[in-house]
Image (cartoon, coloured by chain):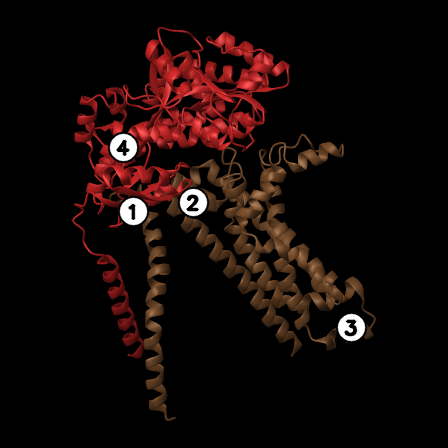
Amino acid sequence: MRARKVLAGAAIVLATAVVATACGGKPDTGGATTGELGFAHNKPWNFDAFSKISKQDIDISLKSTQYSGDPYRAFIRQSFRTKESPGLFTWEVSTALDELAEQGVIAETTDLWTEAVDKGYVTDAVRQLYTVNGKQYCTPISVDDWVMFYNKSVFTKYHLTVPTTWDQLMQVAATLKQHGVTPFWNQTKNFSFVWFQTLLAGTDLQLYNDLSTGKAKYTDPRVVAVMNSWLDLQTKGYFNDPGQTDFARDLMREGKIAMAPEGTWFTADAALAGMTMGKDVDMFVIPAVRPGAATPIAIETAPVCVGESSKQKALGLKFSQWWMSPQGQQPWVKQQGNLPFTPDAEAPTPQMKTLKTTLAAGKYEFYNRYFEATPVPIRTVALEQFSAFLTNRGDPMPYLTAIQAAADEYWAGR
Amino acid sequence: MNRSGATSYQGQARGFLLPSLALVLLVFYLPVLYTFYLSFTKYNGLGTPEFVGLENFASMFEDSAFLDAVRNTAIWVVGTLVLPVGLGLLVAVLAYGFRGSGWLRLPFLVPYALSGVAVGVIWSFMLGSGGALTQALQFLNLPGTELRWLQDSPLNTIVMVIAASWQGVGVNALLFTVGLQSIPKEPLEAARIDGATGLRLFSHITWPLLRPSTTVVVGLSIVNGLKTFDIVQAMTQGGPARSSETLALTMYRDTFVNSDYGLGSAVAIFLSIVTVGASIIYLRRQLSLSSSSLGGGK
């Protein structure tokens, strides 16, 4: 009898605690469009400095919280189960965005995009990356082009000029290798896709796109041939030890590597390592492996999203709108030293101006970076297998077969 | 105090326990039950979990990487039993009885104050490609410079066990020292009078009397070995290609990297069953041995 009373008491306390948890916090209309906006992100950038500008311009400041690694995605996902989902958060334009949009947990931004595209703030091609089932979600804070960064003093020392064809690039690599300098940066784990992307898209962009959409197989002989080209570069010693965990910026500053394929955000990385764009480091467009009508260039876009049920939905959408406009974009790229995605906006540095002019004048075909273009479950396995391929050089087929198994499973479930 | 007064007092005391009990139920048992439920579902962290029966468990056992994780976890359990426990015992026994033995134990205890992640970072610096160890071997013209400590399996798991041992020896030595100090002097003196010294004294008298400490140290070591996560995450993230993954990392990968909460929960349940099962089997065996040895002494 006494035990029953104790159990009953425990049940009451438990129920009270659950109800109190569920009812915690005041309901918020979410209508405020000025104030402090909660911002969860996984970027190394200085959002506090940017917050001062937004505070001055639209009376919204950012309360930034940085997270790192994979738990960030889990944290964001779980936040939608509460009333505490952040008013603004960074995400990725992969199938991870499709999942959030399809579940209706992020705010639609179609109206913001319509206005931005109509006014020429951003191109329709970028809008496509943010489109799920005909509607737009999230907005971009940057759209980076992937180019080759290089150590200028190393190039000067060995009298090297910027290559404009793949053959010239290979000649530069051979010269550097002869002088004991590792030509290219290459890394396992999250960046293990970089050379696969560069070689595959540079050889056959259609095949790259077909692979992303499940129309081609990783075991396709053309993909195997690309992997063998990658293996050939490894065998020639053109890459740093893939097990090195140093940042590309540090290896480049120390002259241990001469070149690194990176997004234009690398300018901020180079500055972190104490290098100055134009003086210590510069960039060039990566030539196509097999020249075609247009040179393929990977783009990488970083989105910010607003939770549909967030108490700060209106505030988050207003900030997103501002960030996508030239008023927000111009100070942001100035701070980052990066390319603006607004076609008419001015690039903040001479190097970025040169790149912008080059890209505007030449024939280039832009494609979504492998990390975002590949469905997440396939990507996870691919990054592991590419890492293994880099670590244990040899026949690429077992690695490709493992990736294809993940691809088969994913596409069968669609 | 009469009987009814005592009962009333006990009732009040139980009432005070209720908030704590509710908290334990909320933050411990409910998540366990929820994880158990999720292990039978397909769930990506959004929307509603979909019941799939034993599908997650079937996929788990079909995955060769999971079986590699089981093998690596077994290496961790055996390795952390042999090295930190064995060396901890050695340090405790060798240092025991010496004047200033605390100073001898101190260098072994300092690493224990570091977090697993910090230990991982330090050892990554030493064992990474072209790291301190390889450079030292090259400088001293010793063999082993060609070894890829963190890239080849199972070498990567073995060197990580050594790194963890570096951290764990000190605390085990401390626990064994406490055990040594609690051994009554009489049986030791009696054995010495009978002529027992050195290894014979240790194996016939000290070691059996250390059983309570050994039970705790070995029990903790088994559990810690089974749930190894932080140091591996810091050093290799389970790679390359999942070759150094432990069960805890498999659970993490499935849940937080792939957002497959159902599969991650299945691995969590499997790991929990193995950990609790191993602990129960070990402790029961130890307790029954203790009882029988007590019985024999009567």
* Label 2 element class: helix
* Label 3 element class: helix
Q: Amino acid at mark 1?
A: Ser
Chain ID for label 1?
A: A
**Left or right of residue A173, residue A20 in this image:** left
Query: How far from the left and from the top, in percent, is residue B83?
Result: 65, 51
Query: How far from the left and from the top, in percent, is residue A1?
Result: 28, 79
- The reply to whether residue A190 is visible in this rendering is yes
Disc 4 marks which residue?
A323
State whether residue A358 is above or below residue A316.
Answer: above
In this rendering, which labeled residue sits more in front, label 1 or label 2?
1
Q: Which mark is residue A79?
A: 1
Q: CA distance from mark 4 to mark 3?
A: 82 Å
Question: Which residue is painted at 49% across and 36% down in the image?
Answer: B242
Q: Which chain is red?
A: A
Q: CA distance from mark 1 to mark 2?
A: 21 Å
Q: Amino acid at mark 4?
A: Trp
Question: What color was chain B assigned in the picture?
Answer: brown
**Left or right of residue B75, residue A383 in this image:** left
Q: Which mark is residue B251?
A: 2
Query: How far from the left and from the top, in percent, is residue B85?
Result: 64, 56
Of residues B224 and A115, the one drawn nearer to the viewer in this rendering: A115
Q: Amino acid at mark 2?
A: Met
Q: CA distance from mark 3 to mark 2?
A: 51 Å
Q: In the rendered structure, are the residues bearing label 1 and label 2 in contact, judged by CB atoms less than 8 Å apart?
A: no
